[in-house]
Amino acid sequence: ARIIEVLSEPYLIQERTISISASIGIAVAEGPGFDADLLLKQADLALYQAKGQGRGVCCVFTAAMDEDLRARLALEMDLRKAIEEQQFELSYQPIFDLKSSKLCGFEALLRWHHPERGLVGPAEFVPLAEETRLIVELGEWVIRQACMDAVRLPGDLRIAVNLSPVQLIFGDAVATVRDILAETGLDPARLELEITETALLANDNRNLGTLRSLKELGVRIVLDDFGTGYSSLSHLLSFPFDKIKIDKSFVMASSEDTGARDILRTIASLGRTLKISITAEGVETIEQGEFLRDIACHELQGFYFAKPLNEL
Ligand code: C2E
Ligand code: MG
Ligand code: MG
């Protein structure tokens, strides 16, 4: 508590008063034979707990956190093994063009065939894969596999791949994508990389630079889950996105909620003004599809049209 107090005192830097806060996680080493890695992980868990409770808090590691830690460590170990043993697979969800009523491409969605737990969805392991940076390796596999599958598709059907912000920060995304395009011979114009707004929040302008270099390769950059999180219209000014995907929560709410319908209408018109293609995802009913057609969205994706397929 004393450390937090001292750190929280305002600093005078170039005649400005700067205030920062600190959170502290504490783990206690018992006996001489402790494991330093484990101790750091325990302190980290206590730190998460502290941050969750607000600013300027300190927390001591407890046994209850230990259970969470064990579960996480087990999952982390499984995940490392899964990458080695290639237990992953891609599902492909069709995306349709509204004007022509034709299939225009697929989104690649990651699936894990866990030997004991069965099929595990990305929501359960992508966050941990990001924390451990395993997503860099895993994400590279996803791009390669998706591109390999896409070249075998007829015509100019596109393939969309989700990119984690961690891949932008810690992976060499530009070299990876460039090499995979060269390796597979896929026309860059057929590859779409989907990022969420969190990628634009981190580390000042470095991610923007990476996105620009990716775009220079000829691939399309898509803003996924638009409307959630830190949705800020300034993100649309900071980068020339090729496409915006409206988050499925708005589409789902649109059945009952006029407010959600107003927001969808506004995003569609925003897309027209900015000349950015608009995709709506999570379309589950014909009514939702018809509404989205009436407000002139460009592309639709959702269980009503097709669930993710096991293969292309
Ligand atoms: P996302 O990119 O927004 O993908 C769309 C999610 O919505 C998919 O869930 C898809 O199965 C689901 N979905 C599609 N249509 C409908 C519908 O009509 N109703 C409902 N309720 N859901 C629908 P999924 O496959 O579980 O993926 C969840 C998220 O995990 C993705 O959201 C994406 O953010 C992430 N993800 C998936 N694959 C990858 C990957 O290869 N790398 C990374 N970094 N993230 C991935
Ligand atoms: Mg996506
Ligand atoms: Mg989405």
Image (cartoon, rainbow, N blue to C red):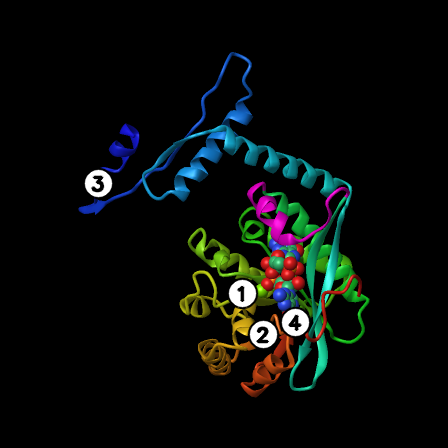
**Of label 4 and label 3, which has the lower sequence position?**
3
Q: Secondary structure at mark 4?
A: loop
The residue pinned by badge 4 equals: 302
Alpha-carbon span between mark 1 and mark 2: 9 Å
Location of mark 3 (residue): 10
Q: Residue furthest front?
A: 256
Badge 4 vs badge 1, beta-carbon distance below 8 Å: no
Q: Nearer the viewer, mark 4 or mark 3?
A: 4
Pointer 1: what residue?
Answer: 225
3D distance between C-alphas at marks 2 and 3: 46 Å
Mark nearer the N terminus (1 vs 2): 1
Looking at the image, is mark 1 or mark 3 nearer the viewer?
1
Q: Is residue 162 visible?
A: no
From the viewer's side, name the closer residue of 15 and 192: 192
Kind of residue at disc 4: Gly
Quadrant assignment for the N terminus: top left
Q: Is 99 situated left or right of 148 in this image?
A: left
Viewer-proximal residue among 78 and 211: 78
Looking at the rendered structure, the kind of residue marked 3 is Pro
Q: Quadrant of residue 110?
A: bottom right
Q: Which mark is residue 280?
A: 2
Q: How far is the residue under mark 2 from the one under mark 4?
A: 8 Å
Which residue type carries mark 2? Ala
C-alpha span from label 4 to label 3? 51 Å
**Residue bounds of the magenta highlight:** 115-132
> Residue visible at 66% across and 53% down?
176
Closest to the observer, 127 or 156: 127
N-terminal of the pair, mark 1 or mark 3, is 3
User: Along the polypeptide, which appears first: circle 2 or circle 3?
Assistant: 3
Kindly state the secondary structure of the residue where label 1 is placed: strand
